Amino acid sequence: MADFVHLHVHSEFSLLDGLGKVKALTQAAAEMEMPALALTDHGVMFGILHFYQAAQKAGIKPIAGCEIYISPREMTQKDVKFDTRPTHLILLAEDQTGYNNLMQIATAAQLEGFYYKPRVDKDFLSAHAQGLIALSSCGSGEVPRFLLNNRPDKARQAAEWYRDVFGPKNFFLELQDHDIPEMEPVNRALVEMSRETGIPLVATNDAHYIRREQAYAHEVLLCIQTGKTMTEPTRLRMNNDSYYLKSAEEMAALFPDLPEALRNTVAIAERCNVDLDPSGYHLPEI
């Protein structure tokens, strides 16, 4: 059994951004002998049931999640000058309460907070934090974004806010290594912040496709999303071909000095237990 679990994964349900189909993702994780896999599509959860059923057939544990967008102000405020750059946060459902809260967050983001992206604000997030495990996300997360902008005090303040909201065992500082030069000092700062605050670390790979050789197809997908062509040098693209579902050995090679960040992926996976029963009727409360 592999000693690593992917907790930051985008599928076809991250529309025009994720390339991997849920069935193929779960099969790939099973072939790498990973005990579980998370699905964290951008702002939506409509792939979760398909993912849950595919993971069960593949013989691995499904972890229901979402990469949500957090508005800089109240989610009902929608001004192009202030509200077009929400931050990211990975949420994973630890239990049934967490899954229900995650659905409420995703729903409110679409129906109440949508402005370019489906967003919620911190007040709504803190009111629906029970049963959820949060990761600080990629360079677009609030904590790493402050670090990228050379504001370490604000980064620590934000990290401590998330720790207080989700609980000391339910918020993790997320480390990624996609060979982005400006993220190297961010990762060092996150490690130092973890040592100073006791907030645990977790290692992820921002998976948008399954195999390395699919990077070109993913570039084409991003061109479709943005209305660009592959010949345009300024088109939106990833910096390299590392955004795939890496093996446990590849992840260990990225973080040789931080084994606890790798072990924590398995520990988180063991804690996440949600049962989605598709049988019978599940009607909304009206």
Image (tube, rainbow, N blue to C red):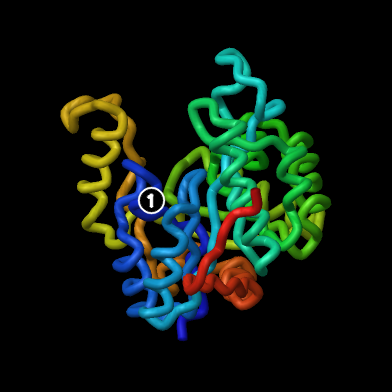
Q: Residue furthest bottom?
A: 1
Residue at coordinates 51% horizontally, 53% vertically from top-left? 176
In the rendered image, is residue 173 in sight? no
Q: Position of residue 48 (x, y in %)?
A: 46, 60
Instruction: Please identify the quarter of the rendering in which residue 157 is found.
Output: top right
Q: Is residue 270 above or below residue 99?
A: below
Q: Position of residue 74 (x, y in %)?
A: 71, 27
Q: Position of residue 84 (x, y in %)?
A: 55, 23
Q: Is residue 25 above or below residue 187?
A: below
In the rendered image, is residue 51 in sight? yes
Is residue 163 left or right of 135 when viewed as pictured? right
Q: Secondary structure at mark 1?
A: loop
274, 237: nearer the viewer: 274
* Amino acid at dot 1: Phe
Is residue 161 left or right of 236 when viewed as pictured? right
Residue at coordinates 67% horizontally, 61% vertically from top-left? 98
Residue at coordinates 54% horizontally, 41% vertically from top-left? 139
Q: Position of residue 108 (x, y in %)?
A: 62, 40
In the rendered image, which residue does mark 1 sit on?
Answer: 13
* Pointer 1 local density, CA inside 10 Å: few below 14, some 14–19, many at least 20: many
Residue at coordinates 44% horizontally, 57% vertically from top-left? 9
Q: Is residue 112 above or below residue 92?
A: above
Q: Is residue 188 above or below residue 133?
A: above
